[in-house]
Image (cartoon, rainbow, N blue to C red):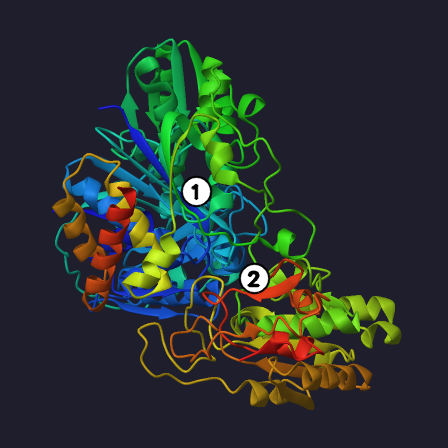
Amino acid sequence: METRSIMIVGVGGQGSLLASRIIGNVLLSQNYDVKVSEVHGMSQRGGSVVTYVKYGDDVASPVVEKGEADIIISFEQLEAARYVQFLKKGGHIVTSTQQIDPMPVITGAAKYPEDIIPKLEAKGIDVIAVDALTLAEQAGTAKASNVVLMGVVSTKMQFDEDVWQKALEQCVPPKFLELNKKAFALGRQAAG
Amino acid sequence: MKKLMLGNEAFARGLYEAGCKIVSSYPGTPSTEITEEIAKYDEVYAEWAPNEKVAMEVALGASIGGARSFCAMKHVGLNVAADPLYTAGYTGVTAGMVIAVADDPGMHSSQNEQDSRHHAIASKTLMIEPSDSAECKEFAKAAYELSEMFDSPVLVRLSTRVSHSQSAVELCDREEKDLVPYEKKAAKYVMMPGNAIKRHPVVEDKLAKAAEYAETSPLNKLEINDTAIGVITSGISYQYAKEALGTKASYLKLGWVNPMPTQIIKDFCAKCGKVYVIEELDGIIESHCKNIGVDVCGKEVFGCIGEISQTIVAEKILGTKPEFDTFDEAVPVRPPVMCAGCPHRGLFYCLSKIGVTVSGDIGCYTLGATPPLCAMDTTICMGASISGLHGFNKARGAESEKKSVAVIGDSTFMHSGMTGLVNVAYNASNTTVIILDNSITGMTGHQQNPTTGKNLKGDPAYAVDLEALCHALGINSVRVVDPYHMAETEKVIREELEKEEPSVIISRRPCALLKYVKHKPALKVDTDKCVGCKMCLKVGCPAISMKDGKSVIDHTQCVGCGICTEMCKLGAIVE
């Protein structure tokens, strides 16, 4: 199988490392060769962060380049706009509708673009936008918006739900498992 | 069983399986997780040292003491540890000694992108380079064999994409190694001139033998496909080349960086048409190829700046370019920022307000250089804030002393700030030093250090008393402030700047991300009182923004630190 690529983008501190671990475990359980690439360090402090997940028969490079991503999972709207260049023609974007102003917007040096999602859709891109933050708060904590988005993404990939449930059990500490399962279910529902 | 593992985690597993007993490191992205992971194995003693030089000396001492030992550091950390490394090349080892050095091409989290391979060549020690997690484990084990076979420390070069990518790893059991009995060998380990002179020929001899061994080492891999294009590569660059070119090219993947083989390179080039050397940063393999008289093409095509990628390889060799959509409007950049509730924010706001020259250092607080605070003039390397400001003040005189401060974190101060402070006291400059004590090593992701009262395993440990230490180093005026109280902090800074003696201000408040730090409820804006003056935005908190002419506070980020309430003269920010 040709290598497939997923990009997880967001703001440092939003929980993209857990999301990449969940997807990585799902893919490993399906016997794919998997590579997950993360960036640690300074960018984790509220900067724009990117995680790559690649899978197939034999994955070489761990990074995703422009025009290569089959799916982009975005934890924040502006990040979806920033990384749309990485989407393959015909790829999908799953994004949270959350908006977090970056420092140049806060200081007034730049403007947060309006109507990002309709503008992406106008390019013929398949965009699923969900209010992951509100759904996560319904599940019990704003921190679970990453797992809500996993619920949404699970509907765009061909694996059975129980495979995702097992990956959740492997990646989430037992005391937070119920909460995260609820967040995941809300994400699946929201995807329709 | 196969497990997804970070390169760093897999490396730690390899050390464990190889019977490594003693580990000492200083954290540094992207190397940090190796030491954190190996600390989870009870069979291994692991510690955070105050700096990389100490760590490497601990590892060398442990090796001389008969135990397989290890230390990890980032590329710039190897500069700090270069002194013991260069002589360890001469002494060699008793039990195997392995050093992981993680380069950061592209500078994701570093102040330069130096190429560590130069250190291996210059120190006349061995160096090998893996390209994914499975190889990280395999190479960690091979490194011990090579170290003992050639009586040399072995460096393993990692890079951000190898260290911080996960791929599948097969786990094996640990092979326990008995302590090698200690024998005094002064001629080998006492490196005074009379002994060292005799060791240098030994070093040259073992390098020659290692080069011969490298010709048949399984760490170098040959893949013959279409031979019109040949690629000589190593580490992560191999993965980029493989993805871009697949079976359209043949590959010689070098696991050995120093010394490099000669004959297999000549044989490979003889088989192939056009041969490219694909390597990140400097042209080390390329220079070797040219020295041995083979015709290759490398840096003239790929350059020596930043990371390579499959796209770059495809574009340069095949002439292909990717297709993609773009967002048609300007997308504002999102640089890293100090977190909501960060104790450094209040301190840097005071410095910005006073308008002093700030000699900075390495850590989260380097973000004090970014807008809107912009309160930093220099950042060079670990510890340079204090020593650099002393030099600046000696150059510019008494006026400068009253208008400048050095800022340095608790961990960085222990790493290499103390010696600079001794110099300030000993050579008498009225320098003002602010130690930003947030009770943790923050930037690398919360590692303990000698001031925190805990060791690497999280057990209680001796905590350095910073006030007493500064007094002992020769500073009479040592004061402590809470940076959440900005008026008081500003007053103390102004007073210390005026004094005709060197002084230290300890700005003390734990990192807001520490688990034990209790957060207050998120603050709110009273929209009736808020006039939209934007004073609260001046502290650069990511939780505060403007909506419809009024400030709003993001309740998911705000930890109720209260810095913004001190900024608001109208009392519009409330609990």
Q: Which amino acid type is marked by label 1? A: Glu
Q: Which residue carries the number 2 mark?
A: B542
Foreground residue among B529 and B351: B529
* For residue B303, above or below residue A146: above
* For residue A108, above or below residue B264: below
Q: Which chain letter matches label 1?
A: B
Query: A163 left or right of B63?
Result: left
Number of other residues with Cα within 10 Å of mark 1, as a class: few under 14, some 14 to 19, many 20 or more: few
The residue at the point 35 percent across, 25 percent down is B243
Q: Is residue B328 something that shows in the picture?
A: yes
Element under label 2? loop
Q: Are marks 2 and 1 on the same chain?
A: yes
Foreground residue among B204 and B331: B331
Q: Residue furthest front?
A: B528
Q: Which residue carries the number 1 mark?
A: B204
The residue at the point 41 percent across, 56 percent down is A14
Q: Position of residue B421 (x, y in %)?
A: 66, 77
Question: Given this view, does label 2 or label 1 mark the residue nearer the observer?
Answer: 2
Q: Position of residue B33 (x, y in %)?
A: 35, 58
* The label number, if any, that marks residue B477 in the structure image: none
Q: Position of residue A153 (x, y in %)?
A: 28, 42
Q: Position of residue A94 (x, y in %)?
A: 36, 40
Q: Which amino acid type is marked by label 2? A: Pro
Query: B528 left or right of B511?
Result: right
Foreground residue among A66 and B94: A66
